[in-house]
Image (cartoon, rainbow, N blue to C red):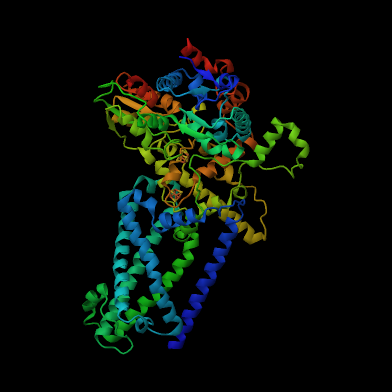
């Protein structure tokens, strides 16, 4: 498999169909790298012509902006926009709801206008177009899966159904947590909380959510966000069920189940 | 005697209207202490929000049972205003049931409908009292409400019950007098509720009945005038402000955080210094983020005055649920309290004179602000289109940009982003390591 960068495409005078915006977690976090690889594999298998920015990609500025540091956010955003516009990027797909939200909703005010798609929505369209073929039977047939709505995809951008539609193709039993969709409970990572210790409280948010997810009796918790991934994995560990309950990204679930 | 009653009524009514409008002007002034923000785009979408969120109470229906009860109380409130119009005109003109000749056969139908609503309102309020004081739902026992806010909610429910009972008693006495063919009590036809209750006054002498009817009439209307003047001091102001607040509700996706053009400009000049020559020098030092209500937008302050203190936001807030100090409801209550404090300061001194206090720290602590995950659960749940999150984010901006106050881990994260282009301290060269691994 050959993953090419925008620079390579540009050098050949070509433009790829989509830019895969990997994001910091997807690039550096060991667990999240697996999500990145799974999604890249799907793109490759389905013949989607895509590129990454590679070393040229920078943080979108999301954690800085939510923490209140608008200066750092603006520096990152303006640099990124310059780069994206230079490459004439039209369509961006990303596996991180924070990158998705900020690229889609917050970059336009700074002159960055792109069609931005979250990977779950993109996967759904690939399925709808018949480009993704599932294995007969499948790894998850008959198993219980529960889906965790990330705040930035769900409440932030009203995307609740696409990820669920993708999960339906796995032939598994989809069970909902007590708090789901627009009533979903945050994993505790957003708003730059990922990068600091939680404030003093009676419990941690991810412990609370981990318990709720495990209580559904599902053997798989499906996530759509690398930060939720970290938080939920810790949350499940706290319940002592890490051997029975796995946290997996929707892209990983699909990659494992594709022909 | 009739003239005296008319005069007394006009005085009471005039005073109530005067006091109310004075307070309303002060609240308007307080709201406009906030920064300007243009929220007049897309009138079509905004009116749709008014219809769905304010009239239709769409968000309330996230909990259907409560929504139905609340709807009774709300519909009762709106519709009974028509009946109050008649009472006021009767009071000023010294007439009795002025609208009977105008409306004819429709009159008893309308009053019957009001009566049924009055019964439903009484029922709704009674159930709400039970929920608040006996069932003790978590969001109603929260310490956010300690003191006046808790009594406020109970006072209003009790008052509504009393007002409804006065209205029904008044009509029952009236119906009995009509049955007796009293000349002053114009025959209107049968009212649904009071008509069937009229027989309880079968043996009450005329004089007593008239006294009962008049007393109820006066207490009912004085109660309403008092209620009117209580509103602006209470969380029940939402019955008015929910409407403009729905109109001015954000039309952007909830995940979107507002841009700061001042910072955008500055960074732009940093990155492209060649643009600086053509730029006019900025006037004065811009302020970043919000420290006090003056720095918030008028919509934030309208939000604060519209808050019903229902606590749906806090009940859904992950930080609040896990015992952190943050409560989005408290953020709204604090903002209103501070705006009121500044308002009193202005009333006293003619203009705001520094009182050494600010919304940040004197009301809202850093600890509260730090706990927010920006998950938007509070925004989603609020039935009155309020965004506590918007205030939290602006206060955070002040902390970080004006005071450089951030937890050490955040300071580290900031410098990682600045130096390594990622929130973690990884080498930029490793950003595509995963891809090189796949390319092998
Ligand atoms: S956005 Fe912040 S204040 Fe609102 S519910 Fe989420 S954590 Fe709580
Ligand atoms: S902000 Fe909204 S949800 Fe929260 S207490 Fe006020 S009215 Fe209720």
Q: Residue furthest front?
A: A13
Task: Work out whether B224 lies above or below B105.
Answer: above
The residue sitting at 34% across, 54% down in the picture is B67
Task: Pick the residue in front: A42 or A204.
Answer: A42
The residue sitting at 55% across, 45% down in the picture is B363
The N terminus of chain B lies in quadrant: bottom left
Q: Residue furthest top?
A: B440
- Give how far across and how far down residue B431 sits, in percent: 54, 18
Task: Pick the residue in front: A237 or B39.
Answer: B39
- Give how far across and how far down residue A38 sits, in percent: 41, 20
- Give how far across and how far down residue B328 sits, in percent: 47, 44
Q: Residue furthest right?
A: B277
| B63 left or right, relative to B235 | left
Q: In terms of image quadrants, where is residue A248?
A: top left
Task: Pick the residue in front: B287 or A70.
Answer: A70
- Give how far across and how far down residue A168 sits, in percent: 30, 31
| A120 left or right, relative to B108 | right
Q: In terms of image quadrants, where is residue B71?
A: bottom left
Q: Is residue B236 visible?
A: yes
């Amino acid at each position: 498999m050959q993953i090419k960068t925008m620079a390579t495409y540009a050098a050949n005078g070509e433009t790829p169909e989509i830019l895969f915006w990997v994001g910091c977690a997807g690039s550096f976090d060991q667990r999240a790298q697996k999500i990145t690889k799974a999604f890249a594999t799907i793109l490759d298998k389905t013949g989607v012509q895509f590129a990454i920015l590679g070393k040229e990609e920078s943080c979108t500025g999301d954690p800085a902006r939510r923490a209140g540091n608008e200066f750092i956010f603006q520096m990152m955003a303006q640099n990124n926009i310059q780069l994206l516009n230079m490459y004439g990027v039209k369509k961006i797909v990303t596996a991180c709801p924070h990158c998705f939200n900020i690229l889609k909703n917050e970059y336009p005010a700074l002159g960055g206008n792109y069609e931005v798609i979250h990977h779950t929505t993109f996967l759904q369209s690939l399925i709808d177009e018949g480009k993704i073929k599932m294995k007969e039977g499948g790894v998850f047939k008959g198993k219980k899966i529960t889906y965790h709505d990330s705040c930035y995809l769900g409440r932030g951008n009203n995307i609740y159904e696409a990820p669920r539609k993708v999960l339906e193709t796995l032939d598994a039993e989809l069970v909902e947590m007590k708090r789901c969709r627009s009533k979903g409970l945050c994993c505790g990572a957003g708003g730059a909380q990922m990068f600091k210790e939680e404030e003093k409280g009676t419990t941690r948010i991810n412990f609370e959510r981990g318990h709720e997810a495990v209580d559904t009796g599902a053997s798989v918790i499906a996530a759509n966000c690398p930060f939720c991934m970290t938080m939920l994995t810790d949350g499940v560990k706290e319940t002592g069920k890490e051997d029975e309950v796995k946290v997996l990204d929707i892209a990983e679930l699909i990659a494992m189940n594709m022909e | 005697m009739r003239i005296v009653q008319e005069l007394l009524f006009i005085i009471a009514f005039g005073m109530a209207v005067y006091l109310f409008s004075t307070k309303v002007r002060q609240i308007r002034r307080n709201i406009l202490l906030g920064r300007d923000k243009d929220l007049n785009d897309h009138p079509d979408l905004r009116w749709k929000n008014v219809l769905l969120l304010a009239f239709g109470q769409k968000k309330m229906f996230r909990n259907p049972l409560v929504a139905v009860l609340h709807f009774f109380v709300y519909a009762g409130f709106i519709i009974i205003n028509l009946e109050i119009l008649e009472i006021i005109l009767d009071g000023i003109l010294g007439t009795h049931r002025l609208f009977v000749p105008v409306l004819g056969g429709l009159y008893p139908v309308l009053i019957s409908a009001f009566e049924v609503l009055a019964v439903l309102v009484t029922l709704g309020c009674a159930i709400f009292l039970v929920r608040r004081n006996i069932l003790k739902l978590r969001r109603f026992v929260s310490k956010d409400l300690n003191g006046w806010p808790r009594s406020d909610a109970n006072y209003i429910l009790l008052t509504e019950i009393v007002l409804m009972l006065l209205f029904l008693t008044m009509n029952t006495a009236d119906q009995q007098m009509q049955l007796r063919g009293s000349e002053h009590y114009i025959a209107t036809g049968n009212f649904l509720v009071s008509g069937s209750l009229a027989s309880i006054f079968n043996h009450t002498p005329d004089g007593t009945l008239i006294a009962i009817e008049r007393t109820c009439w006066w207490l009912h209307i004085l109660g309403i005038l008092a209620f009117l003047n209580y509103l602006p001091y209470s969380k029940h102001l939402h019955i008015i402000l929910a409407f403009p607040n729905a109109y001015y509700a954000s039309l952007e996706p909830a995940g979107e955080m507002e841009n700061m053009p001042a910072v955008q400009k500055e960074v732009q000049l940093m990155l492209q210094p060649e643009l600086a020559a053509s730029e006019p020098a900025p006037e004065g030092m811009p302020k970043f983020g919000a420290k006090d209500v003056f720095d918030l937008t008028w919509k934030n302050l309208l939000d604060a005055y519209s808050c019903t203190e229902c606590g749906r936001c806090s009940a859904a807030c992950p930080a609040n649920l896990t015992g952190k100090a943050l409560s989005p409801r408290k953020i709204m209550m604090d903002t209103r309290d501070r705006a009121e404090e500044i308002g009193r300061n202005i009333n006293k001194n003619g203009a705001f004179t520094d009182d050494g206090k600010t919304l940040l720290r004197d009301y809202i602590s850093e600890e509260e602000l730090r706990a927010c995950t920006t998950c938007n659960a509070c925004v989603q749940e609020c039935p009155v289109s309020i965004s506590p999150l918007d205030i939290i984010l602006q206060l955070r901006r002040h902390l970080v940009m004006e005071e450089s106050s951030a937890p050490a881990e955040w300071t580290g994260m900031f410098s990682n982003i600045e130096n390594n282009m990622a929130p973690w301290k990884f080498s930029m060269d490793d950003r595509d390591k995963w891809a090189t691994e796949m390319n092998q």
